[in-house]
Image (cartoon, rainbow, N blue to C red):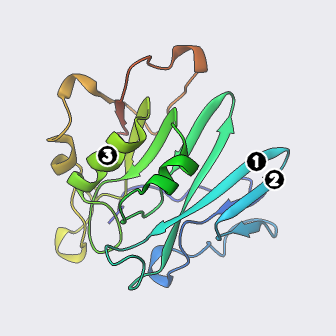
Amino acid sequence: CTAGFREPVPAVDFVLMSSRLLDEGAPSPNLPGNPRILFQAGAYTLNARRYEGIAIPHDRLGGRRFGMNVVWRWQQAGINILHMGGAAGPIGLEERILMGQPDLAFVPVGGGPKAYNAEEAIAAIRALNPKIVVPTHYRTAAADGNACDIDGLDRFLALVPPEQVTRLSGQTLTLIPRNLPTAGPRFYVFRDPV
């Protein structure tokens, strides 16, 4: 479903995983070294930075079908980051308190059985009120629509005011805390790898 994006080959100290389901790309055997892999909810300190994993259902059945997804929260360069992985369950009061108010939230938007659809993503964004949202977990234009059970980005973007969307020309986003929007959210969309 993410056809066209090249697999990164980063220097890896550790890997934050939201799910260990086999069809979701368990850690690549090409990772250099022997990185620590975190996949369970909890608090961790790695390289002098605190990471918090928060459990939320990976399906719409309270986790009974696909188990729990781990949402990862951390602060980097003065920016509060939240990566929701493949969250599919609603954000309850307890999860909302644990997730806090992120400056930057990576939110799944493509639906399917294991992640938020467009409407559920909007509800999650309203609950969290991040300053910046980067949509994730959607079918790219390069993917075969018949072989992919998630929606493209257009369904989600149709629910977002166009003046709040910035389409990036590449695959990187540079943020500086003092330049974050004071009112949000702003939506940043990476260039589709066609």
Where residue 54 appears, as percent x and y from the top left, is 58, 60
Viewer-nearest of labels 2 and 3? Answer: 2
Mark 2 or mark 1: whose residue is earlier in sequence: 2
Vertical placement of 177 versus 28: above or below? above
Q: On the image, which quarter does residue 80 sit in?
A: top right
Where residue 129 appears, as percent x and y from the top left, is 40, 35
Q: Assess disc 1: are there few (<14), some (14-19) or many (≥20) residues with their C-alpha within 10 Å of its C-alpha.
A: few
Residue 145: image tag: none
- Amino acid type shown at disc 1: Arg
Residue 45: image tag: 2
Residue 50: image tag: 1
Residue at the farthest front position: 93
Q: Residue at x 50, y 55 (%)?
A: 95
Mark 1 or mark 3: whose residue is earlier in sequence: 1
Front residue of 75 and 23: 75
Q: Residue at x 50, y 74 (%)?
A: 68
Name the element at disc 3. loop
Vertical placement of 134 versus 194: above or below? above
Q: On the image, which quarter does residue 168 sit in?
A: top left
Viewer-nearest of labels 1 and 3? Answer: 1
Where residue 186 appears, as percent x and y from the top left, is 35, 28
Vertical placement of 36 versus 135: above or below? below
Front residue of 84 and 149: 84
Q: Residue at x 40, y 85 (%)?
A: 64
Name the element at disc 1. strand
Q: CA distance from mark 1 to mark 3?
A: 32 Å
- Residue 141 appears anywhere in the view: no
Kindly identify which residue carries mark 3. 192
Q: Assess disc 3: are there few (<14), some (14-19) or many (≥20) residues with their C-alpha within 10 Å of its C-alpha.
A: some
Q: Are marks 1 and 3 in contact (CB under 8 Å)?
A: no
